[in-house]
Amino acid sequence: MPTIVVEVMPKAELLDPQGKAVAGALRRLGKTEFTGVRVGKRFELTVEGPADAALLAEVQELADTVLSNSVIEDVTDVYVLEVAAGETH
């Protein structure tokens, strides 16, 4: 069964308090090579049947209207997760 992944991130111009908290924790751990962190969301939608263009368009519409808040978030990617033969997801 195919899995469609939707990735959502806070708009670049908005503050990301979760990202700031993670960045602060990394600094306290001595990980100073990281200059910034942004925290987003990832949705995995498992579907019956093929993940064709029509289904991907439907998922994009759902991503824009249900899975994200367009005022503060951007849908950054919608794609079919490729699983190698023998792997399970």
Image (cartoon, rainbow, N blue to C red):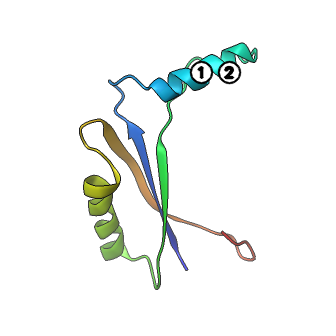
CB under 8 Å between discs 1 and 2: yes
Secondary structure beneath disc 2? helix
Residue 29 image-quadrant placement = top right
Q: Position of residue 21 (x, y in %)?
A: 56, 22
Q: Give the amino acid at mark 2.
A: Leu
How far from the left and from the top, in percent, is residue 81?
55, 64
Q: Residue at x 50, y 29 (%)?
A: 18
Depicted 66 relative to depicted 10: above or below: below
Is there any visible trace of residue 88 in the rendered image?
yes
* Residue 14 badge: none
Disc 1 residue type (three-letter): Ala
x%, y% of residue 20?
Answer: 52, 21
Report the quarter where the C terminus lies: bottom right
Question: Residue 16: which quarter of the image?
Answer: top left
Q: Is residue 34 visible?
A: no
Residue sitting at x 46%, y 24%: 17
Q: Residue at x 36, y 28 (%)?
A: 12
Horizontally, is 23 left or right of 69 in the view?
A: right
Q: Is residue 86 above or below residue 82?
A: below
| Label 1 residue SS | helix
The residue at the point 34 percent across, 74 percent down is: 55
As measured in the structure, the alpha-carbon distance from the residue carrying label 1 to the one carrying label 2 is 5 Å
Q: Which residue is mark 2?
A: 26
Name the residue tied to disc 1: 23
Q: Is residue 89 left or right of residue 65?
A: right
